[in-house]
Amino acid sequence: MSPRDKPLVWLRGKIKTPPFGSDARIEAGFLLRRLQRGELLGLPHSRPMSSVGPGCHELRVVDSKPNWRIMYYVVSDAVVILDVFNKQTVATPKAVIVGCQRRLAEYNRLTAAKKDQRHAQR
């Protein structure tokens, strides 16, 4: 990893064996590395998820049986992973969307509080 690459911040879910198959794990790692290097991904690999929040996307990873999704949010200094789940229906489950919205709000609240603390110390 280059020092210029954005770190991955995992708020929920992991890419590991099981459940990801080896090809899907490699594909997910490759796509995440592209995000870390600042690339903007579009279809078929990624699609915007405005229902979660502005700037949120769904990374699409095809596996031998289930299709996996990695819900992510890119900020200036990190790629924030909101959730990793297997996609079993056409629509993203409401529980996944609500959980991602909650984690995103908490992440934004905590990072705003840290910024406020840094400004107060100056």
Image: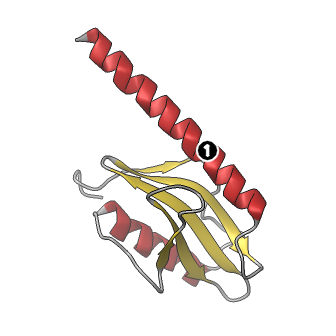
Residue drawn where x is 65% and y is 44% of the image: 102
Q: Amino acid at mark 1?
A: Arg
Residue 84 in the image: above or below residue 65: above
Element assignment for label 1: helix
Q: Horizontally, is 105 left or right of 33 in the view? A: right
Residue drawn where x is 50% and y is 30% of the image: 110
Which residue does the numbered mark 1 point to in the structure image?
Answer: 103
Residue drawn where x is 46% and y is 70% of the image: 29
Rendered image coloring scheme: secondary structure
| Residue 106 rendering spot, x and y as whole percentages | 58, 36
Residue 51 appears in the picture as rendered: yes
| Residue 53 rendering spot, x and y as whole percentages | 53, 55
Residue 89, by quadrant, is bottom right
Residue drawn where x is 65% and y is 79% of the image: 21
| Residue 20 rendering spot, x and y as whole percentages | 65, 74
* Residue situated in front as seen by the camera: 82 or 10: 82
Residue 56 in the image: above or below residue 120: below
Residue 118 in the image: above or below residue 18: above
Q: Horizontally, is 80 left or right of 89 in the view? A: left
Quadrant placement of the N terminus? bottom left
